[in-house]
Amino acid sequence: MKTLLQLFDEWFYYHLFLRRIFGKKVKDVDLLELRDNLDQLAPVIFLSTGRCGTKWLNTVFSKEKSSVSLHHPIPVMRSQAKVAYSFEFAKCSDNEQLLLQEMFLGGREELFLRAEKSKKNLIFTDSRMTFFAEVIRSIFPKAKFVHLHRHPGEVVRSGLRRRWYVEENQSDLNRIEPLPHSSFHQQWEEFDSIEKNAWLWNETNRWISAFLEQVPERQKMSLSFNDWSVDTIQSLCSFCEVQISDQVIERRLNVSVNRQKSVAIPPFRDWNQEDQEKVRRLCSEMATHLNYSI
């Protein structure tokens, strides 16, 4: 357990970090004024399974000073995102929707206030924001959304290497499971770790795709990690309204960020037929939709 001194140190250095990235205050804004104008803000929200290069993108976006990109903002809101998924926002009562909106603002309102004071737009690359997307759009109708995805075999392999759904740890607080009405609910306890991670890839991307059907074309973008190049990243930068030079992108493309260093598991193409079939059975339809061959 962390001591109070350790927690204070984390809080102190995080606020120093925020002061550095937001810079000087250029206008006075109070919380009431912010609340009155939330519908005019246009944050950029990345939606993904995780393990799709979001931390790499954050390092690139951090080179641009007219916006602030955050990969792991505090509070982390792990379990809250899982709650948002389980509530199914569109089916909620007005009071439940209000509760979810206040849950989100409780964790992020200070960041939006700082951004308004420094006249900078916010970009959230954190995958934990994904299942808040409906809540976010209800608060910020001008928000932009980026669906970032990756080949299912690669994401499942990465999840296995990180022992998702195997070892109990704090990251599992945001790891969704089939809801009671899902056809997979009864099968869940029988699934092995490959099947659970494959289900996670499929359900997360299915959920994102369904959500984006409600979003105007000008406010959404889809991008595959497997297709990254200077041109595709520049298209993303343009969508996010950040200016990054080709030279910076080219230099960063060959730099690995957040690489998994433990648990040796071969690439998906080298798996035995039975294990590959588990991924195909659970992911084939969504993989086809996203133009992946498995």
Image (spheres, rainbow, N blue to C red):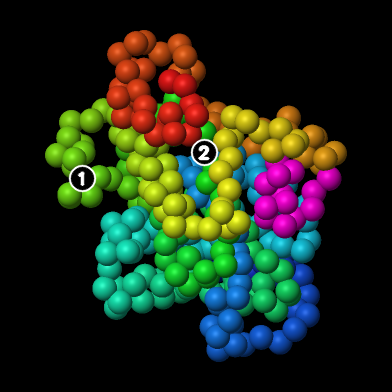
Front in this rendered view, residue 273 or 175: 273
Residue at 48% of width from left, 26% of height from top?
Answer: 292
Left or right position of 244 against 261: right
- Helix, strand, or loop for circle 1? loop
Q: Secondary structure at mark 2?
A: strand
In the image, farthest residue toward the left: 186
Q: Mark 2, residues whose alpha carbon is within 10 Å: few (<14), some, or many (≥20)?
A: many
**Residue 113 vertical placement versus 162 (above, below):** below
The residue depicted at 32 percent of the width and 64 percent of the height is: 90
**Whether residue 247 is situated above or below residue 22 in the rendered picture:** above
Dominant secondary structure of the residues highlighted in magenta in the image: helix
Q: Amino acid at mark 2?
A: His
Quarter of the figure that contains the C terminus = top left
Determine if the magenta segment contains residue 116.
Answer: no
Quick check: 90 left or right of 125? left
Mark 2 sits on what residue? 149
Which of the 4 image quadrants contains residue 234? top right
Residue numbers of the magenta segment: 233-245
Q: Position of residue 256 (x, y in %)?
A: 66, 33
Gap in angstroms between the C-alphas marked 2 and 1? 23 Å
Q: Nearer the viewer, residue 8 or 31?
A: 31
Q: Amino acid at mark 1?
A: Ser
Q: In the image, residue 57 lies at what x, y percent?
A: 66, 45
